[in-house]
């Protein structure tokens, strides 16, 4: 797949900004399409661990720096062993579901601020949060079912 707008070697990050001791903001900045992959697992895990252990934080909001994309699917171009080689998390689950379960149980109010597409990993992250706010004009939240040929959101459908 030769797509010049996306490369697994592009630098991306998940940034944590502590606006105050009680309010944190996590910004997903994984250009060009906010695709989550194995290199992002340690970044998100560190943030989730901090949310679980910092007694001062009360609210965390997740947003995106990539226009049109909250967070999309898992990185299918990454080497499979980069994902399968990651150890299970504290819950015993594989790293991504482990972090999502831990976020859903964290002693903070978690908010997903969605502008753009939230597909697969993005919809899972949004569901793990306590609250979800989506732009009426620019957000689409869906989980395509490629194996069955079913895509619940098409470009012809209206935005949320």
Image: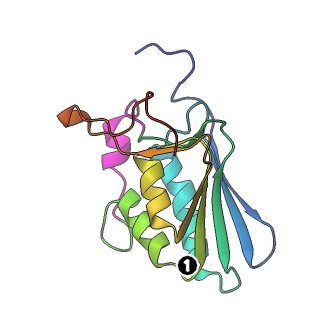
The number of callouts visible is: 1
Which residue does the image show at 52% across and 46% down from the upper left? 160
Q: Nearer the viewer, residue 22 or 143?
A: 143
Q: Position of residue 127 (x, y in %)?
A: 44, 62
Q: Quadrant of residue 78?
A: top left
Relative to the observer, which residue lies in front, 133 or 90? 133
Would you say residue 83 sits in the magenta stretch?
A: yes
Q: What percent of the width, then of the height, locates residue 72?
A: 48, 41
Q: Is residue 37 above or below residue 43?
A: above
- Asked whether 11 falls inside the magenta stretch, the response is no
Residue lying farthest to the left in this orientation = 148
Image color mode:
rainbow
**70 relative position to 67: left or right:** left
Q: Position of residue 118 (x, y in %)?
A: 49, 46
Q: Nearer the viewer, residue 160 or 133?
A: 160
| Residue 53 vertical position relative to residue 139 in the rendered view, above or below | below
Q: Which residues are magenta?
A: 75-88
Between 147 and 9, the residue placed more toward the observer is 147
Residue at label 1? 52
Extreme residue toward the bottom, this view: 55
Residue at x-position 62% and y-position 41%? 137
Residue located at (33% from left, 40% from top): 152
Q: Position of residue 42 (x, y in %)?
A: 52, 56
Secondary structure of the residue carrying tag 1 is helix
| Magenta span dominant secondary structure | loop
Q: Quadrant where the N terminus lies? A: top left
State the residue at coordinates (40%, 29%).
77
* In this picture, residue 94 sits left or right of residue 33: left
Badge 1: residue crowd in 10 Å (few <14, some 14–19, many ≥20): some
């Amino acid at each position: 797949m030769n797509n010049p707008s996306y490369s697994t070697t592009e630098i991306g990050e998940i940034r944590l900004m502590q606006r105050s001791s009680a309010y944190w903001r996590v910004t997903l900045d994984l250009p060009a399409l906010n695709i989550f992959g194995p290199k992002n697992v340690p970044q998100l895990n560190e943030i989730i661990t901090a949310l679980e252990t910092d007694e001062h934080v009360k609210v965390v909001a997740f947003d995106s720096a990539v226009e049109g994309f909250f967070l999309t699917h898992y990185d299918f171009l990454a080497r499979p062993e980069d994902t399968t080689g990651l150890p299970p998390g504290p819950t015993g689950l594989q790293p991504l579901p482990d972090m999502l379960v831990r976020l859903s149980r964290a002693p903070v109010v978690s908010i997903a601020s969605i502008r753009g597409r939230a597909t697969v990993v993005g919809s899972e992250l949004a569901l793990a949060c306590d609250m979800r706010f989506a732009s009426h004009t620019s957000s689409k939240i869906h989980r395509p079912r490629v194996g069955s040929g079913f895509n619940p959101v098409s470009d012809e459908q209206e935005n949320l």
